[in-house]
Amino acid sequence: MKTILHITCLVALTTVSLDAAEPSSAVNKAEGRPNIVIILADDMGYSDLGCYGGEIHTPNIDSIAKNGIRFTDYHAEAKCNPSRQALLTGKYHTRAYNGRDATIAECLKAGRYATYMTGKWDMVGDIGGDSREIPQKRGFDHFFGTPMGCGSFFAPIKLTRDGKPAETESDRPDFYYTDAINDNAVEHIKNTPKDKPVFVYVSHTAPHWPLHALQEDIKKYEDKYSMGWDKLREQRFDRMKAMGLIDRDLPLPPSEMKVAWEKEKNKDWQQRRMEVYAAQIDRMDQGVGRILTALRETGRMHNTLIIVSSDNGGCTVEYSTTRTGAFLNSMTRDGRALTPGNRPDVMPGPEDTWQSYGQWGHVSNTPLRRAKGEEYEGGNRVPLIIQWPAFIKKGGQINNVLCHAIDILPTILDCTGIGYPQNFMGRNPLPPDGISLLPVLEVGVVERKDCLFWEFSGKRAVRQGKWKLVYPRNGPWELYEMDKDPTEQNNLAVKFSEKVEILKRQWEQWYSILPENRRNSKQAQIKNR
């Protein structure tokens, strides 16, 4: 479905206030406020899901797309924790989450929702105290998961239940973190009184490294990737065209793989890496199926807003044999030594390995440029699927509206009729940076009056309608016309130098109004780039 956008970039940045005296028209008085379920994958690329052109078996998530809307131009941040900050607070990570910006959970709890979280927290700039306790301090009635950004799928470090250590729960031989995240979400849905609206944030660590999967799932993908990354990339690209996710006239960009598949020396090991990665997503989807079943069995499905996405693009990091971190276990649960690092002589998957899928990340991001950690599209453009049977009357839609993770909080509040707090933790917070996508759910269009901005570790970007200005590490600025060149192949910075200067000034103004403590800590690196 084609959409129309009227986008201008304002010198004085505008935001959308959600304080409303009356509930939104989206709230059906007969059905009450909708239940909210957010399912967030970790480092999953643009084309991994079946409904986005991937070959990985994801029938449950695909069914959500069949009954809802797939977005083709949705953006997160390029790294995990800034994306999660933006999603939960409705504000850019550069200005959000200083402990005084309301989260989705805090807003919904004020609206008498039951609020639950399962999985990965990974929020920086927090309010202090024991990290195990923070999710519940930020609006969640119950929390099962891990405070840190990644870890073992068989024995996650600092596993937590309601603020208390829960590592012993992983002592069970059948424990697998993805299953535990989904199963706890199911229990919360089943145990909440039917007359109480529920918010469940299902925050996965899959398919972030390490490559840990169950043998029964890996077996499904044996020899699935024997054709190699070059052919797989072509196949995904063709399916995306057939689905209408990308223009049929768009050429497949040149490969960013370090070596062509026919010249790869360790084909068996490389295949196994992708097999395990696929198995991780497959297992996540199986759990999503159990969540959908719980919603149906409790009579909640019809009036539940389901949001499925990823926190950033696929990750091409090659895990080093010498890399360490607080997330890395000292040994397996039964006392065996770990063998960390991407070693072709060690097949990934079991608990005693610790590897990443490396260059396959470029396939995950087909057809986009680059990967996690960069502000090209491969780093921050990700899938977004929204289903709400009580409101979205036509399933299977594809929508091209430009949107961002900062839009999720405003959308949820608009759908529930709950206003953003005017007073929160003793201060008057600024309203969210994002806009509500409720008009998109209703009529397929929305008016966005402000630019979108990105900044992380010196890399930055700004988007104004069809124009995107990107500053990669060490620069210089690059300009792309996204409606004609969504894969960022034709740098127009020289041809349209005036446009570069206009967008550059917009980014600099946006950055200049950051909170002083954030801006000062970054000033030196910006000046030197």
Image (spheres, rainbow, N blue to C red):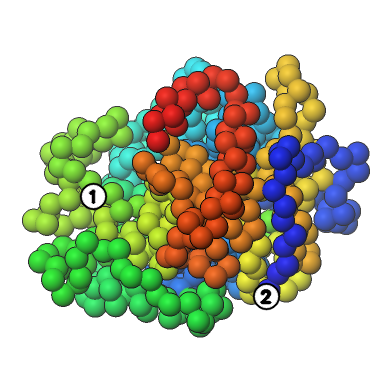
Nearer the N terminus, badge 2 or badge 1?
2
Q: Which mark is residue 318?
A: 1
Residue sitting at 12 percent across and 65 percent down? 266
Kind of residue indicated by mark 1: Glu
Front-lying residue, 340 or 263: 263
Where in the figure is residue 79, as x and y percent of width and height? 44, 43
When the figure is inspected, residue 143 is found, relative to residue 389, above or below; the finding is above
Q: In the image, what residue type sits under mark 2?
A: Met
Say which residue label 2 marks: 1
For this rendering, which residue is in front, 116 or 475? Answer: 475
In the picture provided, is 227 more to the left or to the right than 248? left
Point 50% across, 68% down: residue: 485
Q: Is residue 226 above or below residue 190?
A: below
Q: What SS does tag 1 mark?
A: loop
Quarter-of-image position of residue 422: top right
Residue 457: x percent and y percent? 41, 36
For the question of whether residue 332 can be seen, the reply is yes
Tell me the CA gap for discs 2 and 1.
38 Å
